[in-house]
């Protein structure tokens, strides 16, 4: 029987904001919860621009990929010959729980990438194909995302290079927002949530993305 652990014995470990400096091109993929951390002086566009001011070269919202993932999940359920029930693979904590406690339910996971992994793969395969100097960083309140990036389920290697906790971004971003609230820096904000400085050869964001896990042919259209 194990003794109860003191509250300080376990600590969630995420990357520091300084980790982005290892890459010439640094893409932030913020979770939707980031935008609720600031008051109504700062709208979504302002926060996205603030992430550029912190040193990211691109920003693409995970919420955009969540819409595609939702469509892919509906397609999978509608076309599957198995009536289910099915379990969403979007939450790494749920996936880890199944791996540890209920491995018999792993085949009930919908074979579609999580929104975080889907948007990271879009960056890797569509925005910067064939490049090895691009770092993709999730900004999330969930330490489980770090585990998912290091030990992904359904893919051999995650396209996410690091996970930065919202607690580590909050104050630096707040300071940046104070300077850009009235006049956001020049850049390109597309309807899909992609913020990029205007650079030659950089195109607009497409509206489709491969979302399959484990080789399943599932995509959002």
Image: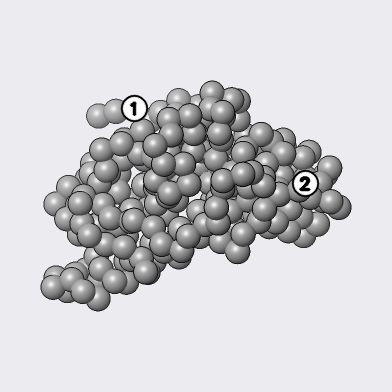
Q: For the residues carrying marks 1 and 2, which lies nearer the camera in this image?
A: 2
Residue at x 20%, y 57% (from the top left corner): 216
Indicate which disc, 1 or 2, sits on the residue closer to the N terminus.
1
* Residue found at the far front of this picture: 200
Could you say which is closer to the camera, residue 53 or residue 81?
A: 53
Q: Quadrant of residue 2?
A: top left
Label 2, residues with CA under 10 Å away: few <14, some 14-19, many ≥20: some
Q: Which mark is residue 158?
A: none
Model colouring: one colour
Q: Is residue 143 above or below residue 210?
A: above
Specify the quadrant that holds the N terminus: top left
Q: Which residue is mark 1?
A: 3
Could you say which is closer to the camera, residue 38 or residue 196?
A: 196
Q: Is residue 150 above or below residue 216?
A: above
- Residue 142: give x, y in percent of width and height: 48, 44
- Residue 199: give x, y in percent of width and height: 64, 43
Where disc 2 sits, the SS reads loop
Question: Is residue 49 something that shows in the picture?
Answer: yes
The reply, left or right, for residue 12 in relation to residue 148 is right
- Residue 56: give x, y in percent of width and height: 62, 37
Residue at x 13%, y 73% (from the top left corner): 81
Residue at x 60%, y 64% (from the top left corner): 191
Q: Is residue 160 above or below residue 21?
A: below
Could you say which is closer to the camera, residue 102 or residue 209?
A: 209
Specify the quadrant that holds the C terminus: bottom left
The reply, left or right, for residue 96 in relation to residue 25 is left
Q: Which residue is mark 2?
A: 185
Calculate the distance from the C-alpha at mark 1 to the C-alpha at mark 2: 54 Å
């Amino acid at each position: 029987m194990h003794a109860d652990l003191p509250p300080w014995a376990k600590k969630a470990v995420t990357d520091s904001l300084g980790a982005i400096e290892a890459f010439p091109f640094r893409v932030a993929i913020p979770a939707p919860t980031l935008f609720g951390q600031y008051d109504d002086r700062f709208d979504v566009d302002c926060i996205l621009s603030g992430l550029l001011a912190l040193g990211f070269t691109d920003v693409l919202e995970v919420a955009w990929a969540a819409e595609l993932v939702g469509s892919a999940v509906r397609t999978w359920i509608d076309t599957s010959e198995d009536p289910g029930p099915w379990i969403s693979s979007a939450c790494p904590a749920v996936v880890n729980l199944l791996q540890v406690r209920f491995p018999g339910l792993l085949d009930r996971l919908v074979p579609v990438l999580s929104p975080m992994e889907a948007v990271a793969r879009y960056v890797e395969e569509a925005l910067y194909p064939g490049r090895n100097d691009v770092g993709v960083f999730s900004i999330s309140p969930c330490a489980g995302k770090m585990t998912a990036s290091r030990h992904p389920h359904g893919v051999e290697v995650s396209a996410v290079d690091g996970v930065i906790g919202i607690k580590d971004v909050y104050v630096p971003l707040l300071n940046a927002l104070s300077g850009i609230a009235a006049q956001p820096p020049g850049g390109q904000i597309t309807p899909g949530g992609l913020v990029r400085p205007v650079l030659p050869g950089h195109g607009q964001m497409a509206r489709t993305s491969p979302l399959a896990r484990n080789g399943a042919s599932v995509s959002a259209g």
